[in-house]
Amino acid sequence: LYRTINTDPWGLKVNDIVESTANDDTFLYNAGGGTAHGLGLYATPNYDGSRVYGDYYDSKKTSMIRFKIRDDAKIGSRKDLKDQYIKEARVKGTLAYKLENDGRYDQPGRFPGNNKQSRMAIYAVSKGYSVLVESSGLKTQKQFRQLLSSGSDVYTVILNRGALIMDK
């Protein structure tokens, strides 16, 4: 998988972001904490997709991180998990219900639409997932790994640092 990063507008330098991704917290965030699509570190198995997404124009301001998903990391479908979350959010006493009705996730900010995605990330981690892919219909870990090995430009969210093996 590839993740292209830039020195962000909040002052976090590329080297700081690389070090943070490699060594910091168990749960990952993007750049300076921005979460346009919710919690997690966004990546793709496609080199060119990552390069274009990350606007790879200046090696002093931009860098690409390459990593592998650990064999024991649990991978799931964002769409399938979202469908499960929506059903469970209607049932009192469930985590999805509690997340859906917790006002702390409704704070306005740079990306006010990220609140639902952040709830989904928390829900996914509670179900044991470390990686989510933008795909549906895949049922086995082998199918998910084949998709991630295909080189296709598949939107991928890494939720847990422990799911990664990184090059130094």
Image (cartoon, rainbow, N blue to C red):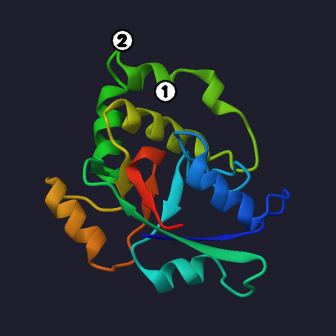
Picture quadrant where residue 18 is located: bottom right
Q: CA distance from mark 1 to mark 2?
A: 11 Å
Spot occupied by residue 143 in the image (x, y as percentages of width and height): 16, 63
Quadrant of the drawing holding the C terminus: bottom right
Pointers 1 and 2 in contact (C-beta within 8 Å): no
* In front of the other: 72 or 45: 72
**Which residue is at the far top?**
93
Q: Residue at x 61, y 47 (%)?
A: 113
How many marks the image carries: the answer is: 2
* In front of the other: 29 or 64: 64
31 relative to 76 in the view: left or right: right
Residue 160 shows in this picture = no
As shown in the figure, which amino acid type bears the numbered disc 2?
Gly
79 relative to 28 in the view: left or right: left
Picture quadrant where residue 4 is located: bottom right
Q: Is residue 114 above or below residue 56?
A: above
Q: Is residue 47 above or below residue 89?
A: below
- Work out whether mark 1 precedes mark 2 in sequence or the reverse, and give the earlier one: 2
Q: Which residue is mark 2?
A: 93
Spot occupied by residue 25 in the image (x, y as percentages of width and height): 58, 40
Please tell me whether mark 1 sits on a helix, a strand or a loop.
helix
As shown in the figure, which amino acid type bears the numbered disc 1?
Glu
What label sits on residue 100 in the rendered view? 1
Spot occupied by residue 11 in the image (x, y as percentages of width and height): 85, 59
Residue 46 shows in this picture = yes
* In front of the other: 45 or 66: 66
* In front of the other: 113 or 154: 154
Please tell me whether mark 2 sits on a helix, a strand or a loop.
loop
Quadrant of the drawing holding the N terminus: bottom left
Q: Residue at x 45, y 56 (%)?
A: 157
Q: Residue at x 71, y 87 (%)?
A: 57
